[in-house]
Image (cartoon, rainbow, N blue to C red):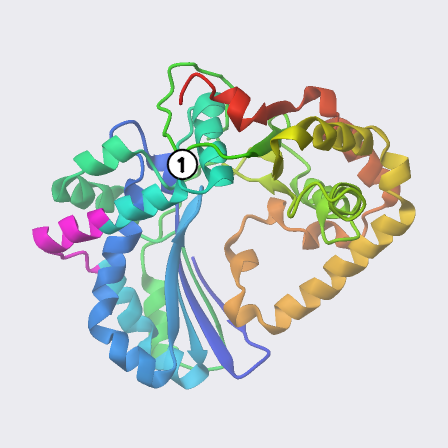
Amino acid sequence: MYKKIKSLVPLSGFFIVYHGSVMNEKKGIYGISHLMEHLLCKGIFPLLEDFESDGIHWNAYTSDTMVVFHMTGLNRNVNKWKKIFYEKIQNFDISEDIFQNEKKIVIEEYKDAFNSQGECHSLNLFRKLYNYYEPIGLLEDLQALTLRDCKDYFELQYRKPNMIVEISNSEDTDTDEFFKSLEYDNRDYAENELVFDPKEDFIHEKGNEYNDKSSIINLSEVISDDFPKVDFICRMLGGGLKSPLYDEIREKNGLVYFFHCYQSKITFSTSVVVLQTETSNENVEKVQNIIANILANPKKYMTQERFQITKEYYINNTEMEDVLLYCNARKTYTPSKFLIESILKDITYEEILRVYDKYFDFSKFYKSVDKNEFENKQ
């Protein structure tokens, strides 16, 4: 599918979207989608100085559900380069030497991920609970991957994009027709689901030796509905320093520096709520008790006033995102069932409390502290 959307500013964005990503991976090739993202970007390298001269910003990312290559800049310059950008990404032709060097870079990125205490905890926990290795993959698989593996995977994941999105003011009939005429990948990944199935024989990756800090991650049961409303609730609970979780745990008690409360959308049909922070070892119980108290008293902390603040935040933020859509286009290629805009007009406080009761019972959360969860793995 090719989408062209009018930009509200004299700047353009161009996005090539491939659905699948980690959902196409299995044991033996964990991490290949992300490695391939790096390798396909090598096709752009001959253009780097031209892009620099024209003020073109470009990059790519691999998420749980998709891989996206993108470029932004002045209308005339994005228009000048977009077809070449697409063709360079699609032309997967690299040498064995480039492959081996890029694999080493990705392995260094992998090791960096496990040097962060919180990220190390999260990556190992999702392996243990869901047999899920995230876009970062698995070290032994990355080390064993060959250029032949990557060429075969290109045919599965990257031969045809799922979608191309352009946010622009430019008129370019020829390239518009070119992108419309492409064959797009219409595979449906809706049946891919996250399954809670804890294992003790998962592949545990050691990070830095534990210091005097503990990483805390609390995970909800798997969610398969109400995604925008769950996002709304996460914002009510943990968005900004005046949110209940930040206000009680950080501002009033000084127990943490950060607190993440978000919905992790692992597939196109399932997600989990993640409550994550780090604190001194002696404060773990205090932090968990405060979280439990907040979640057990929604009408005290999830007030009508907090609801209205959150709703106004999303209304204003959505308007700003529309102005800057050229560089913030995710909602143009994200399934509509995940979009917060779909609920803003009609959402009510009573509906938010109803959804809250379905998913935010803290007694049903999986509660993990890294030192306890992996004490026999060190």
Which residue is at a point 85% across and 46% down the rendered structure image? 348
Label the magenta part by its dominant secondary structure: helix
Q: Which image quarter is the C terminus in?
A: top left
Q: Position of residue 104 (x, y in %)?
A: 21, 48
Front-most of residues 245 and 348:
245
Which residue is at a point 60% across and 32% down the rendered structure image? 216
Q: Is residue 358 above or below residue 134?
A: above
Q: Is residue 42 above or below residue 154?
A: below
Q: Position of residue 336 (x, y in %)?
A: 60, 49
Magenta segment includes 28: no
* Disc 1: CA contacts within 10 A as few (<14), some (14-19) or many (>=20): few
Q: Please say whether residue 256 is visible from this viewpoint.
A: yes
Q: Position of residue 73 (x, y in %)?
A: 43, 78
Callout count: 1
Front-most of residues 355 and 372:
372
Question: In which quadrant of the rendered view does residue 264 lie?
Answer: top right
- In the picture, measured across the screen, residue 224 lies left or right of residue 359, that is left
Q: Which image quarter is the N terminus in?
A: bottom left
Q: Please say whether residue 29 is visible from this viewpoint.
A: no
Start and end of the magenta stretch? 91-104
Magenta segment includes 98: yes
Q: Is residue 33 above or below residue 73?
A: above
Q: Amino acid at mark 1?
A: Asn
Which residue is at a point 50% across and 55% down the rendered structure image? 333
Front-most of residues 10 and 143:
143
Front-most of residues 95 and 87:
95
Q: Which residue is mark 1?
A: 208
Q: Position of residue 281 (x, y in %)?
A: 61, 30
- In the picture, measured across the screen, residue 361 lies left or right of residue 213, that is right
Q: Residue furthest top?
A: 200
- Classify mark 1: helix, strand or loop: loop
